Amino acid sequence: MDVRDILTESLRSALGDLGVDPLPTGITIERPANPEHGDWSTNVALTSAKAAGRNPRELGMALAGVLEASPPMHVTAVEVAGPGFVNFRLANSWLHDVLVDVVSAGSDGWATHTVGTGLSVMVEFVSANPTGPLHAGHGRGACYGDSLARLYQRCGHEVTREFYINDRGAQMQLFADSLAAVAGGTDIPEGGYHGHYIREWAAEMPEGADPLEWGYERALADQRRVLESLDIHFDSWFSERSMIDSGAVEEAMSDLRSQDAVYEDDGAIWLRSSDHGDDKDRVLVKSDTEFTYLLPDVAYHRDKFQRADRLVNVWGADHHGYVARMHSAMQALGHDPSELQVAITQMVSLQRGGEEVRLSKRTGEMVELAEVVDEVGTDAARFTYLLLSVDSQQTFDLDLVASQVNENPVFYVQYAHARIDSIVRRAAEAGMERTPLDEVDLSLLGHQRELALLRALHELPDTVLRACRERAPHQVTTWVRELAASFHGFYHDCRVMGDGIDEGLSQARLWLVEGVRIGLVVALDLLGVTAPEEMWREEDGVG
């Protein structure tokens, strides 16, 4: 049983003994921000004081008295602080139980949750126009969307990853006309595409091929290739054009009309979006009968809600103003707006040698995502894109990210896992096998470095659940960086085996190292990053 469950049940029983009626439906148990205040703390005396008819601090003192008379498992002291906070000090045994739980669950079971059982989630991300390669900025939304999907899966949701192909509109014809012009040796039309890739692709295009269809497939193939190089695989690629052809747009308009959510004015059809929180009404069909971008998007989201319970969109910074109108449209169609969640990704600034990189080394134009992946590698690219919250601007230092030094965050974390594998190999070479865990004296783990690792492992399930609920994969990145730092400190201060190290302590530390390995594997997998067995540092050449 988790230590918080033990404390919660003990508090509930003590409140009953003190005649508190009704008992609180929920009791909050938290880690104090200041470690000097103990291992765990609760505000239940403050929240229950009214029901008890007592002063909060008085109730806290009474609770402490009951609990000290019959201490819960692991509890060594109960203290009251401030206006009535009840603080617990625990024996190290609770952390030793954490290690047993981690090892017993393994990497497949530790830090999993069932909160999403029976709830399907569709994560739509990247969704670029099929008119060229993905650029470096797309990488942030791509890595974020895939990591978020992994978090939802870890929390029990049924997840679909979807790429919405924006293959309708004038930009597609301009793309095709640009390919045809270059292939035919004529001038690219006004407003057309001039990227170096246009010339490369035009040279590849077979004679007699339809530039629109061939270019469409060529662009999608290029985008799919770079995404797969980042270990990002979509369950579906949804074509906007196919939705138009199916009549889904007309069906969406019909539904809006039936809900009296649209009206006509000046020859145009407007969505009553201001009725649902938007700052003004929005045009769905222009006076020339052409759709705006909004109407097909409404139809698309209507379709998605037929396939999933919750929708999560990952959009670029230029879509910020689009959120309110989409929420308004979905509410008009009868959907709970809270079931449509939108993450807006901010810009990424590439740097090399302290200078901003705006242009591709290969083409002198935009920096393609493929170039970033080729230069720094999949793991480094994914980890770096996930270092910060996506709603903050990011600087991506290409030189640092490609380096094998401790200052490189992904190297520092992966190096912790490589060190663990090194310890395991050395133990095997020395003929040392791990004793079954239930035969090992874990009470020998009392060094502050060891206890810090165990506390971190206990925090991972909370971190995963919070990162999922807040759609914040960077919280996992922060956690795993802190775990790696703690492990490197342990590696420096706590020898696992060798002369002068007791056999019992070696066994306990070998199991602690296994627990840390499990934590690293879980977190890195959520980030889409591998856990390598060997690495080398540039500054000393030591693996």
Image (cartoon, grey):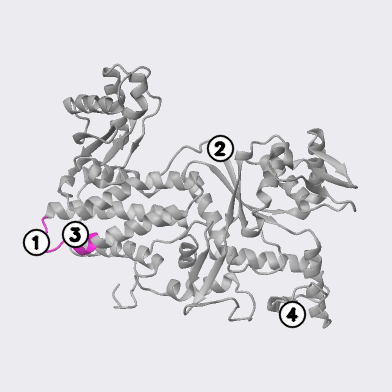
Q: Residue at x 33, y 74 (%)?
A: 537
In the foreground, 166 or 469: 469
Task: State which quarter of the image contains the N terminus.
Answer: top left
Q: Tell me the element at label 3.
A: loop
Q: Tell me the element at label 1.
A: loop
Q: CA distance from mark 4 to mark 1?
A: 70 Å
**Residue 74, x across and y down, in percent:** 21, 36
Would you call the spot at circle 2 few (<14 residues within 10 Å), some (14-19), or many (20 or more)? some
Determine which quarter of the picture holds residue 530. bottom left
Examine the rendered structure and indicate whether residue 530 appears above or below residue 512: below
Q: CA distance from mark 3 to mark 4?
A: 61 Å
**Residue 327, x across and y down, in percent:** 67, 43
Examine the rendered structure and indicate whether residue 25 appears above or below residue 214: above
Q: Is residue 153 visible?
A: no
Find residue 119 and name its label.
2
The prevailing secondary structure element of the residues shown in magenta is: loop
The part of the chain drawn in magenta is 490-502
Q: Residue at x 18, y 58 (%)?
A: 432
Q: Give the residue type that dot 2 points to.
A: Leu
Q: Give the residue type that dot 1 points to.
A: Gly
Q: What is the residue that sits farthest to the left in this orientation? A: 500
Residue located beneath label 3 in the image: 496
| Circles 3, 4 touching at the beta carbon (< 8 Å) | no
Q: Is residue 426 left or right of residue 377?
A: left
Q: Residue at x 69, y 67 (%)?
A: 219
Residue located beneath label 4 in the image: 203
**Residue 164, x across and y down, in percent:** 68, 54
Q: CA distance from mark 2 to mark 4?
A: 48 Å
Determine which quarter of the picture holds residue 133. bottom right
Find residue 500 and name its label.
1
